[in-house]
Image (cartoon, rainbow, N blue to C red):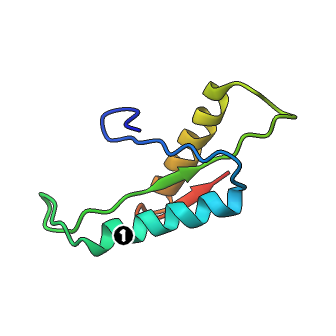
């Protein structure tokens, strides 16, 4: 689902963090393989932040979204075009 301007969410019920990371990496690779040029002459890439709901810590959807957002910015700070989790 589109969450913001250039941000999308994938909600994966009954999926552990390893499975979510695997899917995020597959999506990242698929976008890279499209070879879509951007304004700077490079090719379009994406960064993904992955988080997992732990009911022992929180049951609020906003918390998991904030964790995913932090993981996304971690990926961007590490050089972009990558997948990260906290």
Question: In the image, 45: left or right of 69?
Answer: left
Residue visible at 61% across and 57% down in the picture: 20
Q: Residue furthest front?
A: 14
| Residue that appears at 14% across and 61% down | 40
Q: Which residue is mark 1?
A: 30
Q: Secondary structure at mark 1?
A: helix
- Closest to the observer, 20 or 13: 13
Name the spot of residue 67 as percent of width and height, x first. Answer: 63, 39
* Image quadrant in which the N terminus is located: top left
Q: Position of residue 81 (x, y in %)?
A: 41, 64
Tell me residue 52's x, y (percent).
69, 46
Camera-side residue of 16 and 4: 16
How many numbered marks have been drawn onto this rendered protein structure? 1
Judge from the rendering whether residue 27 lies leftward or rightward of residue 55; answer left or right.
left
Left or right: 55, with 77 as reference point: right
Res 46 quadrant in image: bottom left
Res 5 → quadrant = top left
Give the left or right position of residue 71, taking residue 28 as reference: right
Q: Quadrant of residue 57?
A: top right
**Which residue is at 65% across, 45% downward?**
13
Does 26 sit above or below residue 50?
A: below
Give the residue displayed 69% in from the left and 53% down from the top.
Answer: 15
The furthest residue to the right: 56
Q: How many neighbours does mark 1 have within 10 angstroms: few (below 14), some (14-19), or many (20 or more)?
A: few
Name the foreground residue: 58 vs 10: 10
């Amino acid at each position: 689902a589109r969450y913001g301007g250039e941000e999308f969410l994938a909600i994966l019920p009954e999926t552990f963090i390893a499975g979510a990371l695997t899917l995020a990496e597959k999506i990242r690779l698929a976008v890279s393989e499209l070879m879509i040029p951007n304004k700077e002459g490079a090719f379009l890439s994406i960064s993904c932040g992955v988080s997992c709901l732990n009911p022992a810590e929180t049951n609020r959807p906003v918390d998991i979204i904030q964790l995913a957002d932090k993981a996304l910015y971690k990926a961007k700070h590490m050089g972009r075009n990558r997948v990260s989790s906290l």
